[in-house]
Structures are given as structure tokens and as C-alpha cells.
Image (cartoon, rainbow, N blue to C red):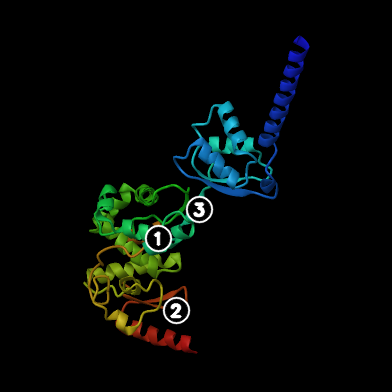
Amino acid sequence: MAKRALRVLAALLVVAAGAAAVGAWQVLVPAPTVLEGSRRVDIPANEGLLEIAQRLEEARVIRNRMAFVALAALRGNARHLKAGEYDIPPDASALRVLQLLESGRVVHHPVLLPEGGSVFELARILESERLAAAADVIRLAHDRAFLRTLNIEASSLEGYLFPDTYLFVRGLTTEEILARMVQRLRAKITPEMLDRARLRGLDLHGLLTLASIVEREAVVRGEMPLIAAVFWNRLRLDMPLQADPTVQYAVGKGRHALSRADLLTDDPYNTYRRPGLPPGPIASPGLAAVEATLSPAPVNYLYFVSIDARRHFFSSTIQQHNAAVARYRLARVR
């Protein structure tokens, strides 16, 4: 009887050892798909361990979901796996996958809002990165209740999203993404800048509005103070700014050429028909455009015309300007 019991115990030990060996193999040896190269998986928020394990097994980055569950339980981190998007490196075992989810080292997506970029352009960028739906970005950017939470007294976020490269992770809300960009603006526009703007009769909104026009008119950064000077001189004389980018904004043409009919459009943003600043920014100005707006060149220019795709010719009188327009337009025709 004792010998039989020993034989049964030995058999059970062999089975247990075999099961342990299989379990160890399942968690320490990478899945075949991972051996072929890196994989990317999304772990949604509020999923439990069993759901996460199922998702990883379906993505074929682990060999066995129950072995993964057992490993997580043994490590005591079953309730602390972090949601997000993960790059699973080649040769990653189930143990390595678990360690990644424990660490929360999720994929960061670089998003560049260029200087002079608009809300509509940002919406397309965020949607292309699958970080937010373009329609949600545009809706929130014009949501007065959301704007109030950011202490913005304006009709939209246009101009209040600082142009920069951001690192966003999937799972952030659209509100969180936009708020972070507004926070970056508040960090970059210093109290000293706002004091200088007030001396020129501008609040933050006015500063961003004029700077956005300078940003969209200038191609070469060195011309920004000259272009700013033209607009300041026109404002002092109560002359219309006649800035093409404001009309492009009014008619929704982005950066495309305007027609004669566009210039006749009756819109508050049409600075050919309305004197003074338009109701708000038309794009996100960079710091160089803001600084140029605060420190325009000491010149009496009132006009400028494109010499080529980058540079402008500046004039002080309408006669000089008309001659320059004729000269450079003729050069382009040739």
C-alpha cells in the first residue's frame, strides 16, 4: 500500500514538474509572431487581467493567456497593469510583455503644429495619428463652455494653441490634448510680453491676432519685423490691413490663391473691406512672430509685394508700391 502511494506521489510530482516546465516555457519563450519582429498592441482603459490576457493572446504576442494570468498573479501586479499603446520588441517573452504593461512605457506619438498652423490643420494631423477625431477637435475648439474652462475669452481656440512638437499618447481625451497646447502657450507668452503688448494697446487676444497675420504673411523670419511695421503703420493711419491670409481664413481657402470675388467677400475677417484687426487670430503664431509684433522695425513702410516665393519688396508710398507691383509681376510673367 505504501509502495503504491509512493508511486502515485512520484507520478504526481512528475506531472507537476512537467506542468511547471510547460508553464515556464510559455512565459519565458517568445511567441512565434514576436520572433518574426516587433508588434504593437492597444490595451484599453478599465480592462481586467483576463481581458488583457485575451487581447494579448489574440494579438499573438503571448503563447497562453492563462500562463500570463498566473504569472501576473505570482508577481502581485494583476491589478496594476497600465492601459495604453505598447511596442512589443522582437524576442519579447510573456514575462517581458508583462513587465512592459507594469511599467506603463507606452508609445508616444510626436505631433507637430507648425508655426502658422490652424485649428483645421491640427484636426487633420491628430486624426491622421488616430489621437482624436477631426470633427471633435473642431467642435471643441469652438465650444464656448470648454473655452471658459481654459479662461479664454474668444470665439475659438484659433491662435491659442502654441505651435510646437508635442508627444501624445493614445487614450488622452481631446480636451486634454487641446488643454496641454493652451498651457504651452501660457508658458511661452511671458508677463513681460503682455506688459509690452499693453503699452501698444493690445491684450493677449489682440497680440495673438496681429502676430498670426504677421506669421502667415512672412516666409523669411528676418522679414517679420518689417511686415509687422507695415501693419502697425496702417493701423495708426486707420488704413485697412489688406492682408491676404485673413481673406483666405474668411473664405476657407487655407493657403490657396485668392480670386477677385474672394477679396470682395463681406466678412469680419476680410481686412480689405474692414479696417482694424479682424475679430481674432487666423493661425497659431510662433514666438518670432509675437516678438516681431511687439518690436516692429523702425520704418515708415506701408506696402509690400512678393519678389519671389520667399521675399518681399517694401514701399512707403503708393507710387513706389505700384511701380514695384508692375516690375515684379512682369518679371514673373517672363
Above or below for 91 versus 218 = above
For marks 3 and 1, the one nearer the N-term is 3
Q: Is 31 placed left or right of 200 in the picture?
A: right
Where disc 1 sits, the SS reads helix
Q: Residue at x 59, y 35 (%)?
A: 66
Residue at image position (37%, 86%) is 323
- Give whichever of 46, 57 is nearer the camera: 57
Looking at the rendered image, the disc whose residue lies closer to the viewer, 2 or 3, is 3
Foreground pick, 44 / 16: 16
> Do the CB atoms of the residues marked 1 and 2 lie less than 8 Å apart?
no
Residue matched to label 2: 307
Where is residue 178 shown, x and y percent of the image?
A: 37, 52
Q: Residues within 10 Å of mark 1 (few under 14, many from 20)?
A: many
Residue 200 falls in image quadrant? bottom left
Residue 200 against residue 218 in the figure, above or below = above
Q: Quadrant of the N terminus?
A: top right
Choose mark 1 or mark 2, whichever is in front: 1
Provide the secondary structure element on which disc 2 rests: loop
Which amino acid lies under the numbered mark 3 shown in the image of this protein? Pro
**Observer-nearest residue: 252 or 42?**
42
